[in-house]
Amino acid sequence: MGKTMKNLNYGILNRMPMHLPPAEEQAWIVAGADQLMALRDKPKVRLGKAQTIQMQLADTIFEKGRH
């Protein structure tokens, strides 16, 4: 279970040491995150393309039915 500090503020946080990985490792982490974001977005892009094709097909069917 988590605990909270009622008096936690910027001053306290500013005095807390924060360790960061070396810049090279940070760049590697960011590149990996970018790759994961691209994978996450692929289904959205495909769905958008599929919806566009579906609308085009519906328009074509509707137009052919009018003739």
Image (cartoon, rainbow, N blue to C red):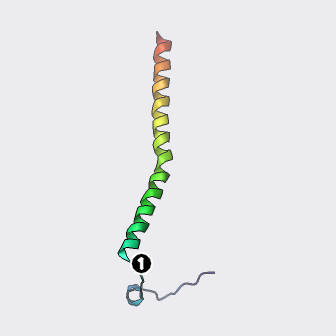
Q: Quadrant of residue 24?
A: bottom left
Residue 59 located left or right of residue 11:
right
Q: What element carries label 1?
A: loop
The residue type indicated by label 1 comes to Pro
Residue 39 location, x and y as percent?
48, 52
- Residue at x 51%, y 46% (from the top left corner): 43
Label 1 crowd bin: few (<14), some (14–19), many (20+), radius 10 Å: few
- Residue at x 45%, y 16% (from the top left corner): 63
The quadrant in which the N terminus is found is: bottom right
Query: Is 20 situated above or below 16?
Result: above
Residue 66 location, x and y as percent?
47, 12
Query: Is 3 situated above or below 62?
Result: below
Residue 55 location, x and y as percent?
47, 29
Query: Is 55 situated above or below 22?
Result: above
Q: In this orientation, which residue lies closer to the viewer: 32 or 6? A: 32
- Residue at x 42%, y 59% (from the top left corner): 34
Farthest residue, direction top? 67
Residue under numbered circle 1: 21
